[in-house]
Amino acid sequence: MAVFDNLNKTTSAGVATAVAEYYDRALLKNVMPELVHCRDLQKRPLPPHNGRRVQFRRFTPFGAVTTPLTEGVTPAGQELTQTALYATVKPYGAHVEITDEMNFFLLDNIHRETVKLLSDQAALSLDSIARDALCAGMNVQFPKDTITARSQITAEDKLTYDMIKKAVRFLKKNNCKPFPDGFYHAVISVDAVHDLTGDAMWTDVSKYQDKQKTEKYELGTIYKVKFFESPNAKVFRAQTYLYGQKQSLAVSAWDAASRLLTVSDALTEDDCRKLIGMLVDVSCAQSGSAGVQTVCIEDARPYVDDKHPATLLLRWNPGETATENWGADGYTTTIVPTGGGTGGIDVHATLIYGENAAGAVELGGYGRNVETIIMPPGSGGASDPLKQRGTVAWKVKGFAATILQDSWIIRLEHAVSA
């Protein structure tokens, strides 16, 4: 029970400030190295009393100057052009109950082990949120030019050297800058590593001239791309539910100019919170034939009344040709979860991106966004009259990640070897 002793007032039960700060530091230390999908993102602090959205800035690059200066004449100044991008900040956390008997009789420090387990959970949770945000980009590349949708990927369509070259060409053509190490970076799944590292062009970390500069989870390089392995890399699987027990949403109207979908379902605030940032498929069917477009939900508004139905704002417009029948009479338009490949096989996503492609809320630093919360037995008041239960928890006050430059990140979708 010593961990719950208050070092300032022995008459009041609680956690000493120094002890709480120790566990906060331990949590952050354990979490940060595991956030593979967050490692290269722009970071923004989360100060209090600033609303539910965090703002990122995307500057428009200047074009080339090809007109020579005129003698004695100062040319007009240039204006900085920027686009404000917003991400909805959401809180996350979980806890474990620890009984007074476990505290009293066990010889080891159960709290330290619990904090380690919770930090692993926090890392997995936040990395998954960032992963899904990065995988919600509009640029996707398939193993063959004849493949136009994820559902057409077969078990033979694996990740190849040619796919990497094509992705690098895409980034270069869009003036995407590599990182200071001279490489574009990529996050790859454990299964996809098996297919790519067997290529003759692969350079393993063991062949680096300076192996001391190797970072955690770094595997090697191929054609100007440095790869980082993640067991949490995105895998698209055939799914039944959109979220919870919800299988689909019915679309009643579509406004291409504002990228706004109107749904007939009575969405709640909690429903909208789950949908924001999600990558989904919009299926538009007529007479048994259906066209599917993959889109990202940028924002969501709940149902208020019949004059103010629930709406979903899309991150991008797939185009008039693909969306002209959405919500139209005679067509059944639904929002469904993203699925797998041919026959329901798993489709793996390999992300390749350059510097400043995406951003996220900062976890450490100003605002103490990440914290460990330890509540001793008896702190529950009337709900714990015999002082039998305490809790250890992790909490992130607010976290979000978003793509800042869509043309600086590309998602390679492919199958993997069995």
Image (cartoon, rainbow, N blue to C red):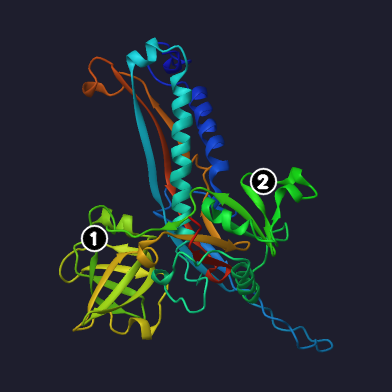
- 382 relative position to 73: left or right: left
The residue that mark 2 highlights is: 215
Q: Residue at x 47, y 37 (%)?
A: 120
- Rounded to the nearest angstrom, the CA distance separating label 2 from label 1 is 41 Å
Task: Quadrant for the N terminus, please.
Answer: top left
Image coords of residue 115 (percent x, y): 46, 29
Name of the residue lying farthest toward the right: 71
In the depicted view, which residue is nearer to us: 82 or 160?
A: 160
Amino acid under disc 2: Glu
Q: Residue at x 35, y 80 (%)?
A: 256
Q: Are marks 2 and 1 in contact (CB under 8 Å)?
A: no
Q: Secondary structure at mark 1?
A: loop
Image coords of residue 252 (percent x, y): 21, 75
**Is residue 394 visible to the viewer in this orientation of the structure?**
yes
**As displayed, is residue 47 above or below residue 414?**
above
In the depicted view, which residue is nearer to us: 28 or 72?
A: 28
**As displayed, is residue 3 above or below residue 364?**
above
Q: Residue at x 44, y 39 (%)?
A: 121
**As displayed, is residue 297 above or below residue 373?**
below
Residue 278 is drawn in which quadrant? bottom left
Amino acid under disc 1: Gln
In the depicted view, which residue is nearer to us: 302 or 160?
A: 160
**As displayed, is residue 123 above or below residue 415?**
above
The residue that mark 1 highlights is: 247
Image coords of residue 373 (percent x, y): 41, 30
Tell which circle, 2 or 1, labels the residue nearer the N-terminal end. Answer: 2
Q: Residue at x 41, y 38 (%)?
A: 395
